[in-house]
Image (tube, rainbow, N blue to C red):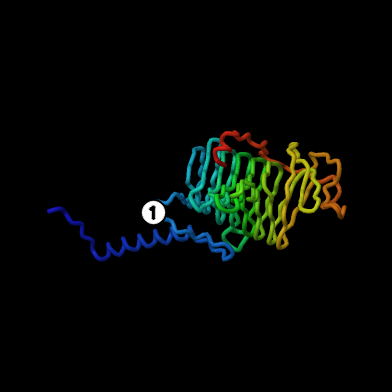
Amino acid sequence: MPAVLRLTSSAAAAVLTLLLLSVRSVSSVLVDDNNDFTLERSLQLNSNVTILNDGAVHTINEKFYKKSFHVRNTTLILENGGEIVAAEDWPGIRLVTSSTFMLKGGIVQGWQDTPAVELHNGQSSDDTASFADIYGGAIIGGKSVDGVGGDAFYVHGFGTKANIFGGLFMGGIGQDDNMEGLSIIVQNFASVHIYSGSFQGEMEVGKGSNIIFYGCFLQYGATITGEFVDGTQLDVVVKTKNDGTVSLIAVSEQVCDTQPSMQPTGFPTISPRPTPAFSYGEMMRPSLISASILLTLLL
């Protein structure tokens, strides 16, 4: 007769308690506490979504196809060689509540009409804001077969902040093979500071948020043109909604032919130069992305 494992009532209760705590822990990871944006998803045991919630630093430099990462209270770094194509109905990377994302190279692409990367606070306090530093690589919105393409980079929530020093941001392709997804969208009192980079697709800023461009720029209506400190050119449309703002800031390392201004009013957006010197830290030039890799992702 095979051996039978018998548990005492106290041991059985302990096992049941442990199982309940495990389920509760997973549920807390998947539900955002901000009523403005619910992150709850129904994940199966064999889901293609990896949850990182250990407070550690995780580095990715390998390829993942139809795989997404949900990050909470944790740091995620994507390096050269790393490629993430999102799981169905998910962004490639979603970061919430005191998380940090650093993109040094590689590619992230969303699923169909979903964003490629989402950066959230997840709470109603600046204390739990998330942060990102983008130095290179590519963030590409998903290609939709029956609607609008996905957005590339979505930044949301109180105090959440992204610094962009380079890289490619490309809105997703829609059903008519037009680029309809946004390259960057900023909502709910977040901010994005842009020092360089290549942006294909319009931007949108709303609900108390701000997009700040550092360099020599002019704004005419919703179109911003000019040059970053490293010589990278910019020509992008930025739509503002619900008290969202756009700021154009000159830096002391660069001599502008004209003051940054908003036409047709002619009033400068900042005080006259000189401006205080700005420290760029480990500023990197945008990474060169293989055309063959991008074509593979977009087709």
The foreground one among 173 and 42 is 173
Q: At x 56% / y 45%, what residue is drawn?
A: 109
Label 1 Cα crowd, 10 Å radius (few <14 / some 14-19 / many 20+):
few
Image height check: is 121 above or below 170?
below
Which quadrant of the figure contains the C terminus?
top right
Residue located beneath label 1 in the image:
45
Point out residue 285 in the picture as x, y percentages from the top left corner: 67, 36
Of all residues shown, which one is farthest toward the left? 1
Q: Amino acid at mark 1?
A: Leu
Q: Is residue 296 visible to us here? A: yes
Point out residue 210 in the picture as x, y percentages from the top left corner: 71, 55
Answer with the quarter of the image where residue 19 lies.
Answer: bottom left
Image height check: is 136 above or below 52?
above
The foreground one among 114 and 252 is 114
Judge from the rendering whether residue 293 lies leftward or rightward of residue 179; answer left or right.
left
Q: At x 12% / y 54%, what residue is drawn?
A: 1
Judge from the rendering whether residue 16 lies leftward or rightward of residue 25; answer left or right.
left
Q: Is residue 131 visible to us here? A: no
Q: At x 39% / y 61%, what residue is drawn?
A: 21
Answer with the quarter of the image where residue 206 lies.
Answer: bottom right
Mark 1 lies on a secondary structure that is loop
Q: At x 86% / y 41%, what residue is drawn?
A: 257
